[in-house]
Amino acid sequence: MLPIVLAIALIGCAREKPAEAAKQATSTALLPTAMDAAGTAADPHPPSFNADRAMQYVREIVAFGPRPIGSSNHKKLENYIVSHLKGDTVEDDAFTADTPEGKFPVRNIVAKFPGSRDGIVVIAGHYDTNYPLRDTGYVGANDGGSSTAVLLELANQLRGKKLEGYSVWLLWTDGEEAVKQWSPTDSLYGSRHLAEKWQKDGTVKQIKAFLLADMIGDADLNVDQDAASTATLESLVYQAATRLGYQSHFFARTISVEDDHLPFVKLGVPCADLIDLDYGYGNVIHHTPQDTLDKLSPKSIEIVGSVILETLRLL
Ligand SMILES: [Zn+2]
């Protein structure tokens, strides 16, 4: 993923000054939904998200080592994800991506949990790790690991239950990371492919919401408000966070993020990217070999997992 504001500062693009971009992003910030007293009262659905189990998933995922597309570790993780979805309805979207570093197999994995209402909520997160850092020992505990794990635990929460709302499709996206340098064509390989596929087969029309989790394990959790996401859905996420008493971890800052939701935003799907792009002071840990387990907290993964479940209830 790429924060547009920071990217402009980094690559020196002259189209927009960082300060202006930041100002613009802030100006498009939606105001958090005002909550009444009832909204902050004891929640009738206490979260059952198992943070310890989710954290154990992160440990096991990180233990595979670097997991860039095309690697044997990546293949191990594919098998690991699918092995945790036994008995679930799983759909593969596998294809060959043409990248600046050559052709790579890319595989999006979807687990489908049927609901009672017409419509689908997609909950997504990427499982590949940064390609350019593949030989540095980079394990992407937060960037790749946390999103994979939160979805695995959400599967545990959804499995075997009669869902009263929309069907929920968990989507492990692949090829999110750029192989050379982030650009519209070198990034988001999996989500771009799937958005096109789902547009062609009519699935896109059924998607009521697309919730994305990325880099949500940081012990110092500050989920950013994303100006590229859909304001009404972001507002619902904030409402869910407030109902659980977690609002202090949400939306202190607004930025505009390029992430796996973008191909779906472009197709008019309501999207919300839950991402904490303040990973270490000034985001210094992001995309460095220091993205390791010791920076994470199970509580952070629990907060985001529970807020996603609460958002499902509000949808
Ligand atoms: Zn990344």
Image (spheres, rainbow, N blue to C red):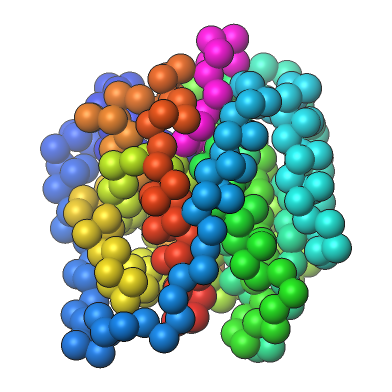
Most extreme residue toward the front is 52
- Residue 93 visible in rendering: no
183 in relation to 253, above or below = above
Q: Residue at 14% across / 37% down in the picture?
A: 19
Q: Quadrant of residue 115?
A: bottom right
In the rendered view, would you say 34 is above or below 248?
below
**Residue 269 visible in the shown view:** yes
Q: Please tell me whether residue 135 belongs to the stretch shown in magenta.
A: yes
**Percent coordinates x, y for residue 304 in the rendering:** 43, 57
Q: Is residue 241 magenta?
A: no
- The stretch in magenta equals 132-144
Residue 80, given in percent of the width and then of the height, sits at 76, 40
Tell me where residue 151 appears, x and y as whole percent.
60, 54
Residue 134 x, y percent position in the rendering: 59, 16
Is most of the magenta stretch helix, strand or loop?
loop
Q: Which of 263/279 is in front?
A: 279
User: At 53% across and 44% down in the image, what residue appears?
Assistant: 55
Left or right, 261 with reference to 273: right
Give the quarter of the image for residue 40: bottom left
288 or 98, which lies in front?
288
- Residue placed at 64% from the left, 34% from the top? 60
